[in-house]
Amino acid sequence: MENKIAIKDLIDTFYDIISGETETERDWDRFRTLFFANAHLMPLRFNDSNECVTTPVNVEAYILGLDRFLKSKNFYEYGLNYKIDINNNIAHVYSEYEAKISLQDKKPIKRGINLVQLIKEGNEWKILNMLWQDK
């Protein structure tokens, strides 16, 4: 149970760091510590031909792209309905998510699914890969 709590806290920290008002400075140094070396973040999209495509990026490329977006819009993303499976030093998390412009908004601007693979490094869990698709 302790591992599941630590993993949920790690994923919640991911969401917390990327959430906030446009003028909010994100703690990108803390964000980097959530990831295993050479981690990949992969948004799943469909192109104009309705082909499924993904372009894996490393943590630094993800930060660069996301930081530009977050400086132009208020953005709050949070996890829902976590399912966490652990086998020794590897874990898989299924997390539905929602995003809003304001926490007071009744309707989200988007919903999606995050699939996160983690590795236990020493006593800490780190994200190895994250794949997501907006609904």
Image (cartoon, rainbow, N blue to C red):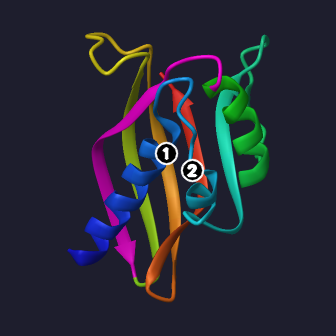
| Residue 27: mark | 2
Q: Which residue is mark 1?
A: 17
Q: Quick one: SS at disc 2?
A: loop
Looking at the image, residue 25 sits to the left or right of residue 20; the answer is right
Mark 2 vs mark 1, CA separation in Å: 6 Å
Q: Is residue 78 magenta?
A: yes
Task: Pick whichever, 77 or 21, lies toward us.
Answer: 21
Near mark 2 (Cα within 10 A), the count class, few <14, some 14-19 or many ≥20, is few
Q: Is residue 128 magenta?
A: no
| Front position among marks 2 and 1 | 2
Residue 68, horizontal then vertical, whole percent: 72, 27
What amino acid does circle 1 point to? Ile
Looking at the image, residue 63 sits to the left or right of residue 76; the answer is right
Q: Quick one: SS at disc 1?
A: helix
- Image marks 2 and 1: residues in contact by CB distance under 8 Å: yes
Q: Residue furthest left?
A: 1
Residue 129, horizontal then vertical, whole percent: 61, 57
Residue 127, above or below 83? below
Q: Quadrant of residue 26?
A: top right
Looking at the image, residue 10 sits to the left or right of residue 72; the answer is left
Residue 134, horizontal then vertical, whole percent: 52, 25
Quadrant of the snapshot with the N terminus: bottom left
Residue 41, above or below 34? above
Residue drawn at point x = 62 percent, y = 51 percent:
28
Give the overall secondary structure of the magenta segment: strand
Q: Quadrant of residue 36?
A: bottom right
Near mark 1 (Cα within 10 A), the count class, few <14, some 14-19 or many ≥20, is some
Range shown magenta: 71-87
Q: Earlier in the sequence, mark 2 or mark 1?
A: 1
Residue drawn at point x = 31 percent, y = 21 percent:
103
